[in-house]
Image (cartoon, helix red, strand yellow):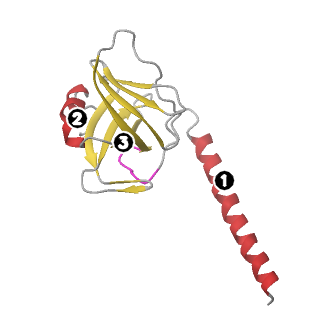
Amino acid sequence: MTRELAGLIMAAIAAAILLTMFFAWRARLRRDSGLTAPLGVPEHAEVSARYEVLHVATTKHGQPLERAAVRPLAYRARGELALTDRGVALSLDGAPTVFLSADRLAGADVATVTIDRVVEPSGLIRLDWRVADGILVDTYLRLSAAEPQQILPELQQLCGAPENGVNS
């Protein structure tokens, strides 16, 4: 086998892998096309604290390695988490502001592992919330300048009472 032939075979394999990844992501986007996060902050929501965050992933509830393409939380992005008296506002770069009202929040806890990220123990914040019709998803956030334990009590206070067997 010549070098040119080996190079062509490797290029064909790489192209096949990239095409497979592309079509798999498109299929996931179609599968989750009905899932959208609520947008816009209520007019009279009072902000109690702001934190710089990295949105790591949004996954199916209880399945930290199964990404959910919830618009506009389908991709990793930097942004700001604002705690308000009515819920949580998540303003990510290049996306409209997502507002998770207290009645949508099902739980908040710390995590160590999710898609694309393994961190020190309790290095991520996991927000469990209802997209629609009781469908739960988990959103994982990494704080830039604070520790998750600093804001976790306030997040847990915002969460409604556990329903449908969801524990925080």
Report the amino acid beneath label 3: Leu
Q: Quadrant of the image for the N terminus?
A: bottom right
Sequence-first disc among 2 and 3? 3
Mark 1 to mark 3: distance in Å? Answer: 25 Å
> Which residue does the numbered mark 3 point to in the structure image?
141
Splitting the image into 4 quarters, where does residue 32 fall? Answer: top right
* Residue 133 percent location from the top left of the image: 43, 28
User: Label 3: how many residues lie within 10 Å, few (<14), some (14-19) or many (20+)?
Assistant: many
SS majority, magenta: loop
Q: Which numbered disc covers residue 68?
A: none
The residue range painted magenta reads 60-66
Q: Which numbered disc covers residue 151?
A: 2
* Residue 121 percent location from the top left of the image: 24, 56
Mark 2 to mark 1: distance in Å? Answer: 37 Å
Q: Residue at x 48, y 48 (%)?
A: 67
* Residue 62 percent location from the top left of the image: 35, 47
28 relative position to 135: left or right: right
Please say whether residue 138 is visible from this viewpoint: no
Report the amino acid beneath label 2: Ile
* Residue 6 percent location from the top left of the image: 76, 82
